[in-house]
Image (spheres, rainbow, N blue to C red):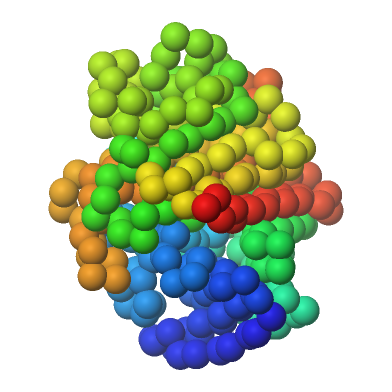
């Protein structure tokens, strides 16, 4: 295993780990973000090679590969009850919803402290009490790891000094072709999720629905294009997939993404109850990443978290982080060479 540090521009640094089997992971103190994951030279994720490229508006580039929170996803109405008190939050989407914890000066666009561990990169930061309207000073640690079994992943740990809302995610986007100008259509996806959360005008519906008979049924592996080009209203109204899926288990492999050429797969394991899958439904006005313009539906996220909307449906889990209690998200991705 080798580790290297390079300049990432704008005062940020890039840390790269490489194992003995040609799997290379790069991450930066800018948002504790994954910027690149290559297997024998093939780029598997959406990202850029300098910090400034993430600052562009197009395609919400600022979130690519970053840690997002305090609360990933949307809080409808930008208000929440926390331990009996009502809080008004930053309405950074359409002036009425809180998206990804309230937008700028969040986890995704700040400079984290960084230290190197044994095949690990450890990022730490704090979110101040009152930021974006949320109570509590939150101390956050993100640990990236890479090993010689071609597994990489992250742990997110946090504690707060007051009861607060806390449901971060890691916003990695995969495209296993090595070229994000290729739409996802011929990637195959299997998902151990018999239920999902329909959206209502792009917002949480606070309900669970059976995937059976819908385009969002990935309980048997299928081409993602079969879903993306279906006439299922949940697809047509959201211009693609942007849905929380309720995982049927929290141990072992819960999802598998297979490259169109059948050479590679990524297998997801997580201790989180849900995963939000978003297929980068940005249309054609998108950034160019490493020489390729991101296609509409050209990459797919696995945002492991509690399903957005849990603030109104306790069966989803809870967004509440009680003062002094530990939060822990462990998510592992196994890269398999299939041929
Ligand atoms: C999308 O739900 C997704 C988010 O994950 C993404 O970051 C944002 O909007 C741009 O709806």
Q: Position of residue 121 (x, y in %)?
A: 67, 75
Q: Is residue 5 visible?
A: yes
Q: Position of residue 335 (x, y in %)?
A: 59, 55
Measuring 71% from the left and 68% from the top, which residue is drawn there? 148
Q: Position of residue 246 (x, y in %)?
A: 60, 27
Relative vertical location of residue 3 with respect to residue 315 in this rendering, above or below: below
Relative vertical location of residue 1 with respect to residue 219 in this rendering, above or below: below
Measuring 64% from the left and 53% from the top, which residue is drawn there? 334
> Which residue is situated farthest in the top direction here?
213
Q: Is residue 68 visible?
A: no
> Could you tell whether 205 is left or right of 233 in the image?
right
Closer to the camera in the image, 281 or 258: 258
Q: Position of residue 280 (x, y in %)?
A: 33, 45
Quick one: quadrant of the N terminus?
bottom right
Classify residue 3 by image quadrant: bottom right
Classify residue 245 by image quadrant: top right
Measuring 83% from the left and 49% from the top, which residue is drawn there? 325
Closer to the camera in the image, 331 or 165: 331
Q: How many marks?
A: 0
Relative vertical location of residue 209 with respect to residue 226 in this rendering, above or below: above
Closer to the camera in the image, 150 or 238: 150
> Which residue is situated farthest in the front direction here?
339
Relative vertical location of residue 64 with respect to residue 52 in this rendering, above or below: above
Measuring 50% from the left and 11% from the top, which residue is drawn there? 212
């Amino acid at each position: 295993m080798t580790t290297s540090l390079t300049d990432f521009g704008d005062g940020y640094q890039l840390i790269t780990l490489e194992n003995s089997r040609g799997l290379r992971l790069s991450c930066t103190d800018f948002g504790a973000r994954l910027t690149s994951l290559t297997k024998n030279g093939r780029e598997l994720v959406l990202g850029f090679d300098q910090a400034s490229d993430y600052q562009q508006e197009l395609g919400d580039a600022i979130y690519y590969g970053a840690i997002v929170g305090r609360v990933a996803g949307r809080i409808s109405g930008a208000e929440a009850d926390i331990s009996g008190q009502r809080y008004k939050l930053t309405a950074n989407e359409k002036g009425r919803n809180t998206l990804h914890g309230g937008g700028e000066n969040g986890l995704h666009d700040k400079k984290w402290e960084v230290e190197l561990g044994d095949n690990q990169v450890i990022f730490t930061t704090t979110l101040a009490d009152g930021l974006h309207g949320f109570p509590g000073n939150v101390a956050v640690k993100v640990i990236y790891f890479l090993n010689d079994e071609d597994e990489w992943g992250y742990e997110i740990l946090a504690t707060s000094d007051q009861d607060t809302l806390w449901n971060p995610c890691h916003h990695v986007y995969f495209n296993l072709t090595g070229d994000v100008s290729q739409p996802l259509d011929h990637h195959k996806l299997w998902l151990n999720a018999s239920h999902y959360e329909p959206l209502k005008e792009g917002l949480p519906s606070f309900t669970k629905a059976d995937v059976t008979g819908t385009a969002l049924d990935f309980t048997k592996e299928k081409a993602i294009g079969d879903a993306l080009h279906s006439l299922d209203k949940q697809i047509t109204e959201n211009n693609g997939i942007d849905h929380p899926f309720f995982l049927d288990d929290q141990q072992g492999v819960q999802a598998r993404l297979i490259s169109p050429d059948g050479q590679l797969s990524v297998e997801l394991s997580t201790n989180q109850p849900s995963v939000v899958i978003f297929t980068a439904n940005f249309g054609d006005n998108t950034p160019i990443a490493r020489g390729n313009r991101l296609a509409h539906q050209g990459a797919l996220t696995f945002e492991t978290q509690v399903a957005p909307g849990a603030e109104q449906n306790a069966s989803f889990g809870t967004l509440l982080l009680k003062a002094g209690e530990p939060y822990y998200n462990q998510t592992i991705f196994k890269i398999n060479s299939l041929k």
